[in-house]
Structures are given as C-alpha cells and as structure tokens.
Image (cartoon, helix red, strand yellow):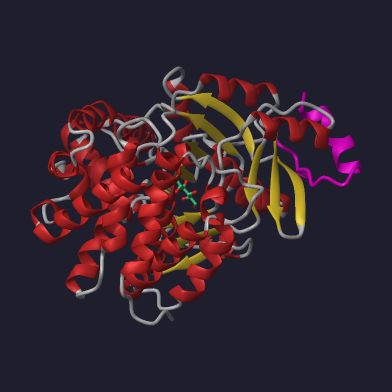
Amino acid sequence: MLNTSSLAALSASGIATPRYARKGAIGVVHLGLGAFHRAHQALVFDALLQRGDARWGVLGVAMRNTALADALASQHGLYAVQVASHAGVQWQVSGALWQTCVAAREPAHVVQALAAPTTRWVTLTVTEKGYTPGLAALLLQGLAARHGAGLGGLTIASCDNLSHNGHRLQALCVEAAQASHPELMPWITSACRFPNSMVDRIVPAATAQRLAAAKLALGVADQAALGTEAFWEWVIESRFVDASDGDVLAAVGVTVVDDVGPFEEAKLRMLNGSHSAMACIGAVAGLPVISDCIAQPTVHAFIHDLMTHEVGPQLKRKDWPAYRNALLARFANPALQHSVHQIATDSSQKIPQRWVPSALDAMRAGRTVERLAFASAAWMRYSLGEDEHGQAYTISDPLAQQTQALARQYAGDAAATVAALSGLATIWGDALPRNPTWLAQVTHHLSAIQTHGVLAAAARLSSTTSTSAAP
Ligand code: CS2
C-alpha cells in the first residue's frame, strides 16, 4: 500500500513525489476532505511546500467520512493524482496532507487545530448544503479558543460553488456568534478574513477503474487515488490576515484579485450550469458520463447554444466566447469519466446559483430562455428516479423525497408536474414561479420530453428556436 516507504521507488520511476519534510506544525485546516480538495487546493499547498515554505502543511478534516480519513491516515496522508490531458496522463503523489481526522468523531482535535498558534488558514469544501449552524458552531469553538488565548485571526476561505462564498461564511459565523459568543463578533470581523474565491477543476469521484489504474501505475495500492484534468484555476480575493500570502499564492499559479465576482459568476453559470443541464439530460437519456453527453451532436449544440444565447451575453466576463470554447473541450475529455449522477446530486442546492440568475437576467434583457426552461424540464423528468430505458436510479438530494413524490404523483401530466415542482421557492426563488411565460416554456419542454424522449426533444429545440448570430 502507498505510504512514506513507497516514495523513493516512485520517484525513481519518474512520478513526482514530495521532496520536503512532511512533519512539523500544521498551517492549514481544511474542512471537507472530498476528491475536489485533494486534487485542487491540496496540490497548491503541495507546490508551496515543494518550494520550501513549510507553513502550508494541511490537517484534512473529513466532516463524516471515517473510511476515507482512515484510509488516508494509513497511507500517511499520501495519495496519487492522475492528470489527463491531450498530451497523455501523468501521475503525481501529493504530500500536503500531514494529518487527517473526522469532525463528527474527533471534534476536539479540529478545535485544537483551529486554535493552534501556527494555524494560519482554514479552507472549506463542504458542498452547497454544508453551510449549516453545525459548521458555524465548530468554527466558532476554534475561534473562541484562539481569541481566548490572545492569538491572531485566521484567513478562512470558502471554496464551494456558491456565489459570494466568503461573505456567506462570514455571515454564518457572525450570526452564530451573535447567539452564542457575542464577545467574539467584533474580533471575527476585525481579526479574521473571509475572502470570496472561485475554484475550478473537474475532479470526478474515484471509481474502481481509477484505483486499478493507480495500482498499475504506482505498483502499490492507493485507496485514495484520483483522476483529474490538467486545467485548474483558483481565483481569490486579496483579503488575507497576512497580506504577503497574496504574492506567495500567486507564485504557484493562484490568481489574486480585488473582486472575484466576474470569475465566480461566469464559472457557476457557464461551467456548473452546463454541467447540471447535462447531468439531468444524461441521467434521463441513460448516458453515464459527461463526455458521452457532449459527444452527442444534439447535446453539444444544446450546451453551445445555452452558453451562447442564454448565459454568456449577460456575464461581466467579456471573454466568455473563449471561455465557452474551452469548456466544451474540457467536457469532452474522455479520461475524466465524470458521472452524470454525481453531478445531479444535490441539484436542488445547485440550480439556484447555476440556472436561476441566468434565466432572470436573460429575461430582463429580452433574450430567449428556451434552453434554461428545457434544462428545468429535464430536471423535473429526472426527479422521477427512472431513466427512459426503465432503469431506476437513486436521487441523492436533501429534497429528494419531496421532489420524487411530486414527480411521481403527476407523472405524465406536464402541466401538473411543472405547477407542483416549480413552486419550490428554495430552488426557483420568487420570480420564476410567478412568470407565466417561463412556466409555459417549461411545460412545453417537459411535454416534448415525455412525448419524444429527452434527446429528440432537445434536437427539435435546436431546429426550431431562432437565435441571433453566435460570437
Ligand atoms: C460539478 C462540479 O458536481 C458538480 O456539481 O458541476 O463539481 C464541477 O466539476 C467543478 O465545480 C469544476 O470546477
């Protein structure tokens, strides 16, 4: 099994491995030890450690997943990442995780780490639904201990796919402090920093095939191996407790900006918005992974036109045509094998930032929203929990029980399904459910999906919708 004693042989066989001492005081507490962190921020910290800056060793905190944290602990925090690009695949072993633990099992360990004098940063990837009072309570315990010990504040960087993620996290902590530690409130706002940030890298959950490929490439088993694409981006606002961190991060490829808004808006609406649309369409059509979806000319045209006519024109980021083209190429990467069901997970938490703002902006600008309405109809069809070949699947979503019950109750009746499912204000907000044109379009597309099947309905949409010339 991969562990410290494997490193010399791996390095001799040409695999990039950590060349630094992997012990000492932890500098970063990361909450949410999923695949994304391990193939994204952890590799940024690994690059900093490789440069000899020992302040970035990570305590990786799984919120609940004991199996993953324990597997990583048994591998001394080491795991391999396969980076797949047109140029081929390359493996590297990350050494940034110096310790792991589980918040639900060892909360005191997390609090202690948050309160340690050497800890400078907290990063979070706890998913959209993870911003709970429980999370705030955990952070507050650590912050209270820090404050009590007379230590400085922390840079606390939310790295989840939420708009204004840093502001949201700060508001959650301040609100919790108001209730339980009012004396902490001024200190949290003055001594800690909550930069907004946009993170991007497509990192599918590991599969048995990936673990088998890792074993073949490494010559030892790695229970925590991952695959990803070559592209990565981390754009973060320059609001750090230690102002010099901006230059340090920039030196390893992080983009440090005053306002992350335009980057975050483009990423959530173009990349994640397209992902969620393909996830629903693919799940209903029985296409297992994103590269299968985008390989279908109908889906390619649909996603291209969605970004071109309904999402891109409203963005603050004016280079969106180039961004769109790069995304279409990234979606086609066959090495990723990114499961549509993984992306469809928690759709009720994702749609509010991925589709709804685009629909509202496009309508305000007098543009078509046909494809956003189609995607919404595809999500309603997806909510039945059974694809067009009669294959059942599990919907993993906090609202699954409710949405699936409604979809089944009105199955086959497009108007009734749309009336029931578009009334969920936590997903659609207030304006869309009251907009008769929107509701009529969603109903029209759901009915077309029911009659023709999702791919044929999408093909009809491409041939009937008139659109302006594409940039
Ligand atoms: C995906 C994201 O699962 C999902 O919802 O859309 O994880 C996506 O792959 C990343 O945000 C890419 O940066």
Nearer the observer, 355 or 373: 373
Task: Determine whether, in the image, residue 258 is placed left or right of residue 68.
Answer: left
Q: Give me the residue at 38% from left, 48% from top.
A: 454
Residue 164: x %, y % from top left: 31, 56
Q: Is residue 249 visible?
A: yes
Q: Is residue 213 above or below residue 201?
A: above
Q: Is residue 259 magenta?
A: no
Considering the image in quadrants, where does the N terminus appear? top right
Q: Give me the residue at 75% from left, 35% from top.
A: 213
Task: Determine whether, in the image, residue 100 is placed left or right of residue 186.
Answer: right
Nearer the observer, 367 or 59: 367
Residue 396: x %, y % from top left: 37, 30
Residue 302: x %, y % from top left: 41, 61
Highlighted range, magenta? 1-22
Q: Is residue 19 magenta?
A: yes
Q: Is residue 125 visible?
A: no
